[in-house]
Image (tube, rainbow, N blue to C red):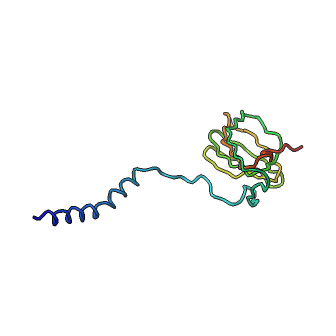
Amino acid sequence: MRASNRRVRISFCALLFAPLTNVAAQENGPTVTTLLSTGTTVVGETLRYPAAGAAHVTAEIVTLPPGVRTAPHKHGVPMFAYILDGEITVDYGDRGKRTYHKGDSIMEARDVVHFGTDAGARPARILVVFMGAEGVADTIPMK
């Protein structure tokens, strides 16, 4: 077999099996699990970002002991929450109460006053991400 013919066959085989290599790499690569994809909060408010100030993101882990209640509040910026452990019941006043459990994701109410209570037997741990702006309060205490 001539060298040029052999190169053509090797090149053809490489092209033929190249997609299999990419598929195998994808199967062993990272997986993506969407936690939340929404344009509204849990009470149906349309998401909107602060118009003033430079963008600023704050991520926190909030731990709420059993039987403890947060103070009534609302949010000045969109807030994403993911329940890491335990459960929390949030009271949205005339919009009702909702209980969130480990593994739940939410876009929290922004303009509706609410408070949360850990009614479970162990501490609730919540990953909270505020998508705000410099000079805009993430949480606004209410009476």
Residue 59, compared with residue 18, is above or below; it is above
- Residue 141 appears at what percent x and percent y? 85, 42
Q: Is 16 in front, or is 62? A: 16
Q: Quadrant of residue 123?
A: top right
Count how many numbered circles sit on residues in the image: 0
Task: Give 103 or 73, whichever is nearer the viewer.
Answer: 73
- The percent coordinates of residue 5 (x first, y second) are 16, 66
Q: Which residue does the image show at 71% across and 59% down from the upper left? A: 40
Q: Residue furthest right?
A: 143
**Residue at 69%, 35% in the rendered image:** 63
The residue lying furthest to the left in this view is 1
Say if 33 sits above or below 87 in the image.
below
Residue displayed at 46% across by 50% down: 30
Q: Position of residue 55 (x, y in %)?
A: 72, 50
* Quadrant (top left, top right, bottom left, bottom right) of the C terminus: top right
| Residue 3 shown left or right of residue 37 in the figure | left
Q: Nearer the viewer, residue 24 or 85?
A: 24
Looking at the picture, how far across and down is residue 59, in whole percent?
67, 42
Name the quadrant containing residue 126. Answer: top right
Quadrant for the N terminus in the image:
bottom left
